[in-house]
Image (spheres, coloured by chain):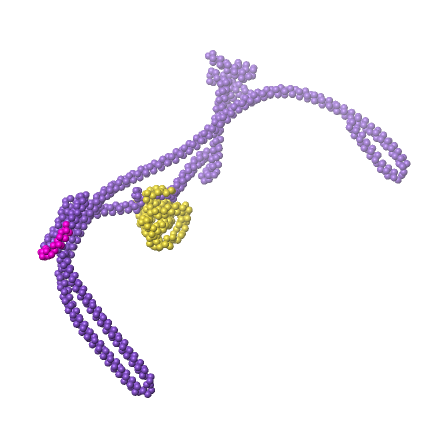
Chain colours: A yellow, B purple
Amino acid sequence: MTSTLKGITLKGSAELVAEFFSFGINSILYQRGIYPPETFTRVTHYDLSLLLTTDPKLKSYLTNVVSQLKEWLFECTVQKLVLVITCLETNEVLERWQFDIECDKSAKESSAPREKSIKTIQHEIRSVIRQITATVTFLPLLETPCAFDLLVYTDKDLVVPDKWEESGPQTIDQPEEVRLHSFTTSIHKVNSMVAYKKTESA
Amino acid sequence: MDLEDDTTILTTLKSFNSFISRPEHPQRLSEHSAGSGILQSQYKRSMELLEAAERVHSKNRYLQLDQEKKQMELSHKRARFELERAASDSARDLEHEVDRNQELLGQIKKLEERAEEVNKKLTEQKEANDALQKNLEGLNKTLEERDDKLGTANQTIRSLKDEIRELRQKIQNQDSKMSAQTLENQELQEKIDLQQRKYQEVSQLCQSLQAAQSSCSDHIIKIKELERRLVFQEQDFAIVKTVKSEVARVPDLEKELKRLRDDNAYLRESRENCSLLKEEVEGLRKKLERMEKTKEELINMELEKEVKVVCTHLYANCSVLCLVCRKPEDLSREVIQIQQREIALKEQNYTLNSRVRSVERSQSELRAELTQQHSKTLEEQKKREAQDALVRRLQKRVLLLTKERDGMRAILESYDSELAPTEYSPQLSKRLREAEDILLKTQSHNAEMEVCLQAIIFFVSQAELELESLKKQQASALLNSVCACIFFLRQKIEDLERERQRLEEQNNILEMRLERHNLQGDYDPVKTRVLHLKMNPTAIAKQERQQEVEALRQEVTRLRDLVRSLQSGGAVGHSQDDTHNPSFSLSLAPSKEVLDLRKQMESSELRNQRLKEVFQRKIQEFRTVCYVLTGYQIDITTENQYRLTSVYAEHMDDSLLFKKGSNGSMQLMETEFSKTLGEMVALHLHHQKSIPAFLSAVTLDLFSRQTTV
C-alpha cells in the first residue's frame, strides 16, 4: 500500500489513477441514470460516500477495462480515457466525459519514489468527484434509453490486446464543453472535462 | 302297456310285501310269548292266507289287466284312426309342399341365375370399383403428393416472400445507410478539403516559419558573433578604462606615498617619543609604586597604630583579665593583616606587571606597524614602478588595438558586402588566425618594447597625450562605424522579431485550434489510436435492441396473419360467429382450435371437391367409354327417365326414352324417333323382350344407313 510508504512510485500512481477511474465511472453511471439506481450500493472511499454497481456483467466489464488501463498507465502509453453516452434510438452521442492523462516518463527510468502525500492526492480526487456529482445541475436530462462505452486513446505503436478493437473518436457535433478540476500524483496528471450536446431549446 | 303292466306288478308286489311285513311284527311278538308249535300253525295259516291273498290279488290284477288291455286296444284304435287322418293330412300337405318345393326350386333356380348374373355384375362392378378405387387411390396419392408439394411450395413461397420482404427492408436500410454514408462521405471530404487547405496553409506557414527561423538563427549567429566582438571590444574598452583609472590613480598613489612617508617620519618621531614616554612611564610607575607602597605602609602603619592603640587601650583596660588570650589573637590578627597586605601588594605587583606587559605589547605592535608601513612603502614604490611599466605596455596595446580595429572594420565591411553563411565560417577562421597572428606579433613586439623601457620613459607623457588624442579619435570613428552596423543589424533584428511574433501568434492560434479539437476528442492518427472492448455495453445494448425489434416484427407479422385468417374465417362463418366475434379479438386459445377446425374443414372441402372432380372425370370417362362401346349416349333427363341417343343418329333430336318402372323394369317411351322404329320395337321388345337386342338392332340399322349414305 502506498499509504504506508512516504513516496509515490510509478506502480502506486497507476493504481491510484485506476482506482479513481473505477469510482468516477460508477458515479457518472449513477448520476446520469444509465443504470437503475437500485443496482448501486454505497461504499466509503476518499472520505466520501460513493456508489458502486452490483450488476455482475457491468462489474466484470469495468474490471476488465480498469485492469488493462492499469497496465497501460504503468507503461505510460495511455493518453486519454473517454466515457461516451449514446442514445440507443438515434445512435447519437449525447455526452462525452474525457479524462486526459499526462505521464511523466522520467519516472519510468528512475525508480525513486516521489514525495507527495496521499492525503493531498485524495483531497484533489475528492474535489473532482464532487464536481462530477455537481454537474447534474447543468447537464441536460437523458430521457431516451442510453448506453455507454469506454474509449482509450493510446500510442499508435501499442500492441492491441485480445478482445479490444479500434474505434472512432465518437465526437459530438457542436458540443458544450465544461472543464473540471484536475489532480496529479506527481507522476500522472489527470485533467477532467465533460462535453454534451446542446439541447434544442437552448 | 307292458310298462304299465310292469308297474302294476311292481305295485302289487310292494303291497304284498308290506302285508307280509305287517303280520310278521305281531307274529314276532306272539312268538316270544307262545311256543314253536303255535308259531308253526300260525305260520301255516299265515302262509295259507298269504297264498289266498295272492290268488285274490292275482285275479284282481288279471281283471285289471284285462280291462286295461281293452282300454288300451280302444285307445290304440283311436290312435290309429287319428294317425290315419293325420297321415292323410300330412300326405296332402306333402303334396302341397312338394308342389311348393318345385315352384320354389324353379324360383330358386331363377334366383340363382339372377344371383349369378348379379354376382357377375357385382364382380364386374367390384373389379370396376377396385380399379376405380385404385385409380382413386393413385389419384389421391397424386393429389396428396400434389397437395404436399403445393403446401411445401406455399411454405417456400411464404418463406421466400418473407425473405423478399426482409431483403427489401434490408435493401431499404442499406440504401438509407448508403445515402447517409454518402452524405457523411461528402461532409468528410469537405472537411478533409478544408483541413487539407488548412494543412497546406499551415505547412506554408511552417515553411515560412522554418525559413524565417533559419534566417533568424543565422542572424542570431551573426548577432552573437557581433556581440562577442562587441564584448571583446567592451572588454578592451573596460581594460582601457581600468588602465585609465589606474593611470588616474597614480597621482593618488603618489599622494598616498607622500602621506605614508610623512606617517613614517611621524611614526619614527612618535617612536622616539614613545621610548621617552616609556622611560617617563617607568619612572612614574616606580614613583607610583613607591608612593603606593608608602601610602600603604602609612595606612598600615596607621591601622597598626590604631590597632595598637586599641590594643594598648584594651590591654590597659583589660590587662588584668585576659592578657594571655588576646596577645595571640592580636598576633594572629596582625599576622592576618600582614598577610592581607602582602596579598594586596602582590596583586598590585601583578597588575603593574600586566600593565608593563601590555605596554610592551603595544610597543611591539607599534614596531610591527612600523615595519608594515615600511614594507607598504616599499610595495608602493614597486607598484609605482610596475604602473610605469603598465603604462608603457598600455601604450603598446593601444597601438595594437588600433590595428585590430582596423582589421575588424575591414571584416565588418566585408561582412556587410558578402553576408554569405557558407563562406562565413572559413572567413571567420581565417580572420581568427589573422588575429592570432597579430596577437603573437604584438606579444613579440611587447617583449621587445619591454627591453627598451628605460629609453622610452621620456616619451611617456607625450605618448600619453598622443594616446589620449588618438583614442578619442579612434573611439569616435569606431563607435560611429560600429554604431552604424549595430543600428542596421538592430533594424534587421527588429524586423525578424516582428515576423517571428506574427508567426508565433499564428502558431498560437493553430495550437489553440488543435487544443480545442483535442478537447472535443480529435486526435492525430499518426501518433494515437482509439481502442475499446468489443463486448462493450453499447454494442450489447444495440444487439439486444435489434433482437427485440426483430422479435417484435415477427410478432407483428404473426398477428397480422392471425388477423387475416380470423377475418377470412369470420367471413365464412359470419352468421354463426356473430356473438363470438368480439371474443376472437380478445382470446387466442379458442381461435387456434377454430383455425384448426377451419383448416380441417377446408382440407375436407378440398378433398370433397377433388373427389367430385375425380368422380366427374371418371363418370365422364365411363360415359364416353359407354358411348363409344355401346354406341348410345345415355342421359338422365328426369327421375327414372333415360334418354338414349345413338352415335349414328341422323338427327340430333333422334333419341329413345326409357322409363324405369316401379318393379325395376325398363319401358320404352314413345318418341318421334321410336315411332319410326315400330317394327323393331315390335320384334325385339314385344316379341323377344330384349332391350339390348333392340338397341343393337337400331344401331345396326342406323350404321347401315350411314354407311350406305
Q: State which quarter of the image contains the N terminus of chain B.
A: top right
Report if residue B451 lies within the magenta region: yes
Report if residue A149 lies within the magenta region: no
Identify the residue at image location x=15%, y=69%: B269
Identify the residue at image location x=48%, y=22%: B620
User: Does residue B467 lie above or below B11 as drawn?
Assistant: below
Residue A70: x %, y % from top left: 36, 48
Residue placed most toward the observer, B252 or A150: B252
**What kind of secondary structure does the magenta stretch mostly adopt?**
helix
Identify the residue at image location x=17%, y=69%: B271
Identify the residue at image location x=14%, y=61%: B381
State the extent of the magenta-drawn residues as a range.
Answer: B441-464
Residue placed most toward the observer, B591 or B234: B234
Residue placed most toward the observer, A114 or B313: B313
Residue B585: x %, y % from top left: 44, 39
Would you say B549 lies left or right of B206 here?
right
User: Does residue B241 lie above or below A151 as drawn?
Assistant: below
Query: Which image quadrant for residue B195?
Result: top left
Would you say B481 lies left or right of B57 here?
left
